[in-house]
Image (cartoon, grey):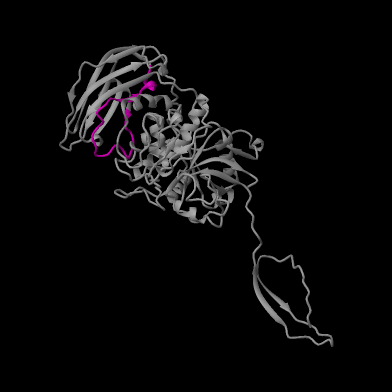
Amino acid sequence: NDLNTSYTWSGYSEGAHVFEVRAQDSDGAYSNVISWNFTYNAASQETGGFKVANSWGIGGWENVPDGFLYITYEAMKQNKVLCFVVDPKDNYEPRAIAIFKISHLVRDDCSVYVGVGNPSSPSREKRFDDYYQRSGPHPYPDNKMVLDITELLPFNNETLYLKVYDTNTGSTGTIEFFSVEIYDNYPSGIPSSVFTSTQTPKNTVNNSYVNVQIPGVTVSAASNYDLSSNDGGLSKRLLEGMKETMGVYEEGRGYNEIINGYGTGLRPPSVEEWEEIANSWYEMEAFGLQETLPVSLDHSSSIHFPPIGNQGNEGSCVAFSVGYYTATFYEACDRNWDLSGAQWVGGYYGAPTASYQDRILSPDFIYHQINDGYDQGSAYQDAMKLISNTGVSSWKEMPYNPNDSKTWPSESAWREAPRYRSRTNVMRVLMVENDQDIQTLKSYINAGYLVSISVDADKYANLSPSDVWNSTNYTNPNTNHANTIVGYDDHL
């Protein structure tokens, strides 16, 4: 009677159990046995996670208003999260650029090449606008365009050419201008040599190649662009895992899923792109001695990291991840730009502080060239290839506009882009499955990399109060959005 006794029970194994209790009164009589059926689950704790930057601004989509979230190591492994990197900068400056102007009502009709030697059997050649989702059914801009051709150097009394293939759609255009400029000091804006074709203007022909040439060019400067990584290759297992996670591009489908007013925009590769990725990409391998890795690292606290951006409702997440965050951070580290005073001003339709816009790189320079001319999203491989082949301009030269998805850059933006081109064309990928993969990823971050990852933006609603995705609240993701890993913390 009125017996109040408490006990601490411990030592249970996980699973189903029956707990039986009976009472004894003061006369020694026992009550009936009362049984409780219960299932015991040991409290789980996940330690360690990666810090991730989103491109939906600060507040609104998150619980802690700072623009960042964390994803635990366990959640990364459980969901086989895909990670993508391009190499940081290494003091690259262009030495040779091709300048040209083309008039055509449908820029997607034209394939444009700059090369050396005989146009029908060149000794070396580079394609402009070499992306699967290209320029779309819109006219070329009424200004000159630029392609960095430093990797084609040197020229030994050789012919340089601009070649255009015009598909058979009934519309034709005109090569208005072609020249090649050589630089000893590109930032000066003053070329040491200029070679200009006298064969312009020249009309294109449907279903045929036409070219204009510059004969007898000699330039002794050697290339300072690293092409040693042209031959790559992924294992069949990794490739199939990537396909299973990301899917295959469906013609005509838009990949900018709007969630609470914010755009996403991660497009999967096409069948042809998967074939190219299989043969040319590399799997990420660990850097150095991993036991020397620090327990935490946060590049977003660096003076070289830009403020959290907001893509609005445009499907430019890949361009924000690969361009705005990663390329800006690499350039700022390489050129010692201090971005610590930059802020995002204006919210949903905002921009970085005006005085910093010449040192923060433009998402729209990337997105408008790889979205097929519409706001339907874009793919990692096109964005990374554009930065490797062409470069990217500053925000100042091509401001971001979420209401415009098709306008191409001005001549000044084209001319600036080669300065901010990746030093090499290396593209690497990792599918996180185990603790070794976590260590590999941490070693990249420790080596100065930022990492683009594929996430499910629908699951921001499941974030913990401290904005953490773990193996319980981040499950079975549909990868529709690109975010950026900026650091990690083993003690999270």
The image position of residue 178, as x and y in percent, is: 26, 20
**Side of 204 relative to 326 (left or right):** left
The image position of residue 16, as x and y in percent, is: 64, 71
Q: Residue at x 35, y 21 (%)?
A: 97
Q: Is residue 380 visible?
A: no
Magenta span covers which residues?
Answer: 127-153
**Side of 68 relative to 136 (left or right):** right
Of residues 349 and 96, the one drawn nearer to the viewer in this rendering: 349
Per the picture, the main secondary structure of the magenta-coloured stretch is: loop
Q: Is residue 24 visible?
A: yes
The image position of residue 352, as x and y in percent, is: 45, 35
In the rendered image, the residue lying farthest to the front is: 346
**Numbered marks: total:** 0
Displayed quadrant of residue 103: top left
In the rendered image, the residue lying farthest to the right is: 27
Of residues 66 and 231, the one drawn nearer to the viewer in this rendering: 66
Q: Residue at x 33, y 46 (%)?
A: 376
In the rendered image, the residue lying farthest to the left is: 170
The image position of residue 92, as x and y in percent, is: 46, 23
Of residues 229 and 132, the one drawn nearer to the viewer in this rendering: 132
Residue 130, magenta (yes or no): yes
Residue 145, magenta (yes or no): yes
User: Which quarter of the rendering shows the N terminus?
Assistant: bottom right
